[in-house]
């Protein structure tokens, strides 16, 4: 995704095994979808690396020095393309867990409403 017109994903690393069965989908992705993906995203550096005996994954390196790793083990080429597109579209920020489910500026004095009310 672009922030102020600048794409945040700098580098996409495609790691696969040329022998393993779990890399079958990513090998097909590299033959069919990867050239078009590179052509449609000229701002992106796409690197392929061979890791024999390891499960395949996609690693995205962002401008804010964060990295995201997505396992694409036993996925179809279309699912791998979807994962690569999601990495490209994300901002690379860390996921922040909310402390409570109910977020408001003015919390209720009586407490939050629940469906598990016992009378």
Image (spheres, rainbow, N blue to C red):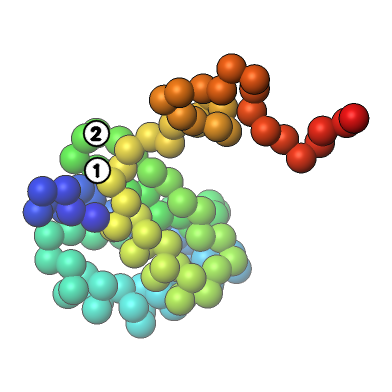
Q: Residue furthest top?
A: 109
**Residue at screen point 48% across, 70% down:** 79
**Residue closer to the observer: 75 or 5:** 5
Q: Name the residue under label 1.
A: 62
Q: In this view, does 33 lie above or below 107?
A: below
- The answer to whether any part of residue 46 appears in the image is yes
**Residue at screen point 24% across, 78% down:** 36
**Residue at screen point 24% across, 55% down:** 1
Horizontal side of residue 115 vs 28, given as left or right: right
Quadrant of the rendered image containing residue 33? bottom left
**Residue closer to the observer: 97 or 82:** 97
Q: Residue furthest right?
A: 119
Q: Name the residue under label 2.
A: 65
Q: Position of residue 84 (x, y in %)?
A: 36, 62
Is the C-beta separation of discs 2 and 1 under 8 Å?
Answer: yes
**Residue closer to the observer: 95 or 26:** 95
């Amino acid at each position: 995704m672009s922030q102020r017109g600048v794409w945040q994903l700098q580098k996409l690393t495609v790691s696969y095994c040329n022998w393993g069965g779990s890399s079958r989908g990513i090998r097909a992705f590299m033959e069919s979808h990867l050239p078009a993906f590179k052509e449609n995203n000229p701002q992106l550096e796409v690197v392929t690396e061979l890791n024999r005996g390891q499960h395949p994954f996609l690693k995205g390196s962002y401008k804010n020095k964060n990295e995201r790793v997505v396992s694409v083990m036993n996925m179809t080429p279309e699912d791998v393309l979807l994962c690569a597109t999601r990495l490209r579209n994300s901002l690379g920020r860390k996921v922040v867990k909310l402390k409570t489910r109910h977020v408001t500026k003015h919390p209720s004095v009586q407490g939050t409403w629940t469906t598990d009310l016992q009378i």
